[in-house]
Image: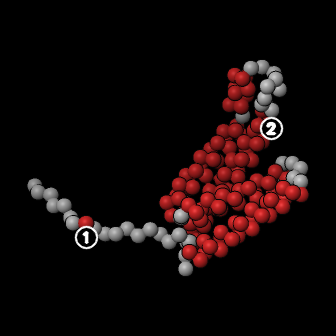
Amino acid sequence: MVFEVPSPESLPVASAPPAGTAGSALLLVVSVAFAVGGQLMLKTAMDRVGRIGAGELSGGASQVVGRAAREPRLWLGLVLFGVSALFWLIVLSRVPLSVAYPFVGISYVLVVAFARFALGEHVPALRWIGVAVVACGIVIVGLSFRRAAI
């Protein structure tokens, strides 16, 4: 039996999907949503575990780790981050990093909003201004993302 090796010219050329497809944008949003969910779960888990620091928890480090390990919200947060990472890998296979990574800024906006309205954290005005600046940057990157697809 003889195997013939095809010449490089005869092989099909795989074309990368366009950077600005709606599907890629949706994957970005899904990745960010899972990351935000992960952040919120980790924060609520650690609120239940308690503050970690020198002399602030009774017992040694092993007790703190044990208490954290028994917190279901911590595990859910880690799983959500893992799912986010899987979607992120798909995004990176489709979208230039210079376009994809600034979209992670959506998570900053959402986390601050959820921290304020779902967790009841105080968010000062200056932080809201920073969030607005980040949101404006995301819009600008989004416009370039749309133009790249044209």
* Visible residue check, residue 42: yes
Query: For mark 1, does the 10 Å Cα neighbourhood hold few (<14), some (14 to 19), or many (20 or more) residues?
Result: few
Taking the view exactly as shown, the residue that stands out farthest to the top is 59
Separation (CA) of disc 1 from disc 2 = 60 Å
Which of the image's four quarters has the C terminus?
Answer: bottom right
The foreground one among 1 and 61 is: 61
Query: For mark 2, does the 10 Å Cα neighbourhood hold few (<14), some (14 to 19), or many (20 or more) residues?
Result: few
The circle on residue 77 is: none
Residue 110: name its quadrant: bottom right
According to the image, what is the colour scheme of the structure? secondary structure
Q: Position of residue 114 (x, y in %)?
A: 80, 54
Q: Circle 2 sits on which residue? A: 47
Which of the image's four quarters has the N terminus?
Answer: bottom left
Q: Position of residue 100 (x, y in %)?
A: 59, 62
Q: Circle 1 sits on which residue? A: 9
Q: Position of residue 149 (x, y in %)?
A: 55, 76
**Secondary-structure class at tag 2:** helix
Indicate whether 97 appears above or below 68. below
Q: Position of residue 87 (x, y in %)?
A: 56, 55
Q: Residue at x 89, y 57 (%)?
A: 125
Direction from residue 13 to residue 133 in the image, left or right: right
Residue type (three-letter) at the residue carrying disc 2: Asp
Residue type (three-letter) at the residue carrying disc 1: Glu
